[in-house]
Image (tube, helix red, strand yellow):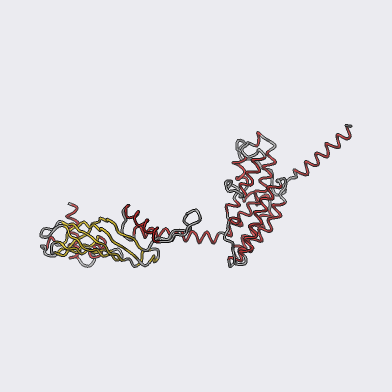
Amino acid sequence: MSRRRLSSALIGAALLACTWLQPDPAVAAVSCPKDTDEIRFCFANLVSLARLQQDNQGLWSDLQRAKTHLATAKTGAERAQVAGAAFADLKPEIAGTPNVPANVIGQLVGNLDAAIQWYRLAGTGAPPDDKIPVSIGRWMLDNTDETGSAGAIVKDWLTGAGCWAVVPKNKPECIPVLEAAVGVGIRVLVAREVVDEFNLPQRAKNLTEVTTRAAQWEAYLYGTQFQYAWELVANRYIDNSWRKIPEDPFGNELGLRIPPTNRGIFLHPDVGLQYISGQSNGDKVVAALTFEWLGYMQWKGYKDNKVDGLWGISVVSTVADERNAPKMGTGVMLHWGDYALAITSHGGHIAYTINLKLGDKLSTVNDTWAKEIQKPLDKAKQ
């Protein structure tokens, strides 16, 4: 081959390489923050809103405009139309990213098309049940484990190129690949931000629901009488048996579990204050142990996240240090709200036992009652 032909061939190859590895106008030169960082660790950090604003003012402006329109849209359908338009505008940007393999572009554009279709249907008021195309995880670059996500697509590309778990300075040919990945990454970042802004009202709604459910469950656990471990197990079993809990095809519960509005009482010990007839004046009110064998509680629901309208009844035995009557008696205990009253028979004597919360309430009626209620409590401490 003559020198002229050789020179022409070399020039042609150089021009071809320059054409294929054209610089990305949307991305400045990139490098890992530390020379020892592998690409898999530094890639996601290189793709940031700050870099997007710095390197691509056009995309940055489009994103801010879309966010403004999403924030001011009055209905969910309007928000879907705005998001769909933003994705449609983003499609040629991603499709035209320089130096990215065609199969990678094809997968990302396929995700865009699926999202655009979802938003188009949601814009008519009929959003599809399958929300995967518009899930935030679909567009997170650090979500490399979800098949078909942007993060997994980029990871597969860099892994196939031998540039995923390598330090760029040890393999210089991976630097252009990293720059191309960052180029497509900041464009994917726009999609993630649009999805995130679109989901903002739903996230706020979810947060409110989670907060409400947590408060209601706390009311169920602590506002209906303390439950011992065996009572929690029994009530959970009963609740699962009586209520139909929505489940997915794999048996996992869907949504946030609503706390029950009833529960059982099983072998429940407690303490209270007992008044019994036929005793001397100084011993009519004594400390007592109550033991509810079996009972039932129910309430209207949760008003202001508090148990509302609770009532209940149980079979109970009480034990107290009575002088002129059997120490143990059996009867019924009535519950209403935070208060409880047991009525039991002790060898012909009728005893009335109240829980400590009712005792606290009665002690505020007058000083005489307060002193009578305090006597057995002081004696129990001795």
User: Picture coordinates of residue 147 (x, y %)?
Assistant: 60, 48
Q: Quadrant of residue 31?
A: top right
User: Picture coordinates of residue 235 (x, y %)?
Assistant: 35, 57
Residue shown at 47%/61% (left/top)? 209
Q: Left or right? Give the position of 31 relative to 223.
A: right
User: Picture coordinates of residue 53 (x, y %)?
Assistant: 65, 52
Q: Nearer the viewer, residue 376 or 261?
A: 261
Quarter holding the N terminus is top right
User: Picture coordinates of residue 154 (x, y %)?
Assistant: 64, 46
Q: How many marks?
A: 0
Q: Nearer the viewer, residue 122 or 199?
A: 122
Q: Nearer the viewer, residue 49 or 192?
A: 192
Residue shown at 65%/33% (left/top)? 170
Q: Left or right? Give the position of 302 relative to 378.
A: right
Q: Quadrant of residue 126?
A: bottom right
Q: Nearer the viewer, residue 353 or 266?
A: 266
